[in-house]
Amino acid sequence: MKAIVVTDRAAGTTGMKLAERPEPLAAINDVIVQIHASGFVPTEMAWPSTWTDRRDRDRTPSIPGHEVAGVVTALGYGTTGLSVGQRVFGLADWHRDGTLAEYVAVEARNLAPLPGDVDFAVGASLPISGLTAWQGLFQHGRLQAGQSVLVHGSAGAVGSMVAQLAREAGAYVVGTGRAADRQKALDFGAQAFVDLDNDALEDVGRIDLVFDVIGGDIQKRSAGLIRAGGTLVSIVGPAEARPADGLAVDFVCRVRSRPTE
């Protein structure tokens, strides 16, 4: 099959080359997906998992990309819940060859059915942003209906997912961004919007959960808005400021995986 591979960590994205690679085989509980659309994050070139397996063994030439949408072509032994010919989308394991290829092997539990009215390109754009939003809100932020959420970058890839999921869960959503982002943020579910260039952030009052994608001064000011028992969730590294009487959590999106032999 044709795939984009990398072999030189120092070369970054300039080292990406089109090559012929063997088609993947389905291991236990795997699914082989014929790829119709895939997602790639340039920062993958700096991830250790792009270059080594879980035992820190070199695995180059490796295939980057982890978000995928396509059609199931084969099932590994013991795989259940999916069928050959089914449209799916999901996320490939960080430590295995990825989705910038014609085919990829993915654990079945990391895939979901893709509805027929959802384009493959849309499906492939969702997994990392969607999982980051979900894990931040519900696993780390423990969001409950009736709470308030301040979503920074609410018109962006992650922020727009956070706004939609929080609104669907019954939270009151305040979005932030630049003036040009206002209508988009409101369309994605924010019930109020703060223009970070012209409005006073502190005017939003007390908040139960802050979802931060910016960091720096905005994060520090946001920490002061969190109610007692509230949470600051950051995806931009360890929090530089913590709520006076709450939690600060930083995390990266996790995909479920099995150990590498």
Image (spheres, rainbow, N blue to C red):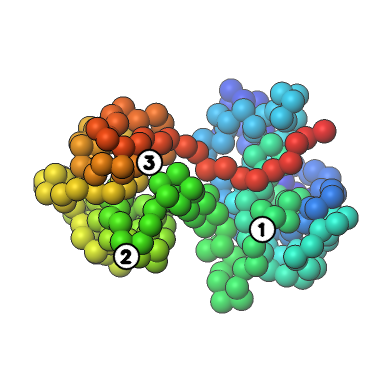
Q: Label 2's element?
A: loop
Q: Amino acid at mark 1?
A: Leu
Q: Quadrant of the C terminus?
A: top right
Mark carried by residue 189? 2
The image shows residue 228 at horizontal and vertical percentages of 26, 41
Mark carried by residue 233? 3
- Considering depth in this image, is 46 or 258 the residue closer to the camera? 258
Q: Amino acid at mark 3?
A: Val
- Among numbered discs 3 and 1, the one appearing first in the sequence: 1
The image shows residue 90 at horizontal and vertical percentages of 62, 56
> Residue shown at 39%/53% (left/top)?
143
| Pair 2/3: label in front | 3
In this figure, which residue is indicated by the disc labeled 1?
111
Q: Is residue 169 visible?
A: yes
Give the residue furthest to the right: 77
Marks 2/1 in contact by CB < 8 Å: the verdict is: no
- Considering depth in this image, is 196 or 227 the residue closer to the camera? 227
C-alpha distance separating marks 2 and 3: 19 Å
Packing grade of label 3 (10 A; few <14, some 14-19, many >=20) is many
